[in-house]
Amino acid sequence: MPDAGQRADLIAFLKEASDGHGERAVRTAGFQDLKKLGADRQVQAIRYCHDTYHVTTVDGQTADFWEANLRLKTDSSDTGPVAGKPVIMPAGMMGDRASVFFVSPDEISTFIKHQC
């Protein structure tokens, strides 16, 4: 590998993997600290009607997602969201997909309101 930075990154990753932390390195690669996201990513409410989720963020914006295009995920790590304050991250190149991260599975069903 001619690029010294890439070579150092690969060596660090392999060293962490050999120490038994490789799964964590892969899982967190490319993710930012979800606690530090702005109001445009902090979810205030999620409403479900027919086949659509309506996600409202703290800044007052609402985005609609077809149910197959919204992923509900959990992240209880140190860089996961604050309890009771899920966050949304874009996914997909067309802007029609997203993932909402909760701190635990218990939050998901209590946070989503079925309302048309």
Image (tube, rainbow, N blue to C red):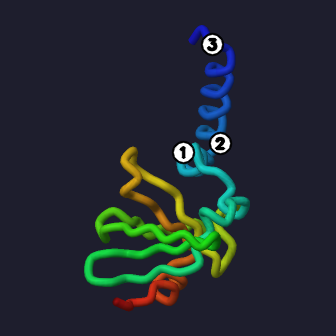
- Where residue 113 appears, x then y in whole percent? 44, 89
Quadrant of the image for the C terminus? bottom left
Q: Amino acid at mark 2?
A: Asp
Which numbered circle lies on residue 26?
1
Circle 3 is placed at which residue position? 3
CA gap, disc 3 to disc 1?
Answer: 21 Å
From the viewer's side, name the closer residue of 112 and 15: 112
Dot 1 or dot 2: first in sequence order is 2
Quadrant of the image for the N terminus? top right
Residue plotted at (59% across, 40% down): 17
Q: Nearer the viewer, mark 3 or mark 1?
A: 3
Instruction: Determine which quarter of the picture holds residue 81.
Output: bottom right
- Where residue 20 appears, x then y in whole percent? 61, 47
Q: In this image, 17 relative to 90: left or right?
A: right
Q: Amino acid at mark 3?
A: Asp
Q: Are marks 3 and 1 in contact (CB under 8 Å)?
A: no
Q: Nearer the viewer, mark 1 or mark 2?
A: 1
Residue plotted at (64% across, 76% down): 85
Which numbered circle lies on residue 105?
none
Residue plotted at (31% across, 71% down): 67
Helix, strand or loop status at disc 2: helix
Circle 2 is placed at which residue position? 19
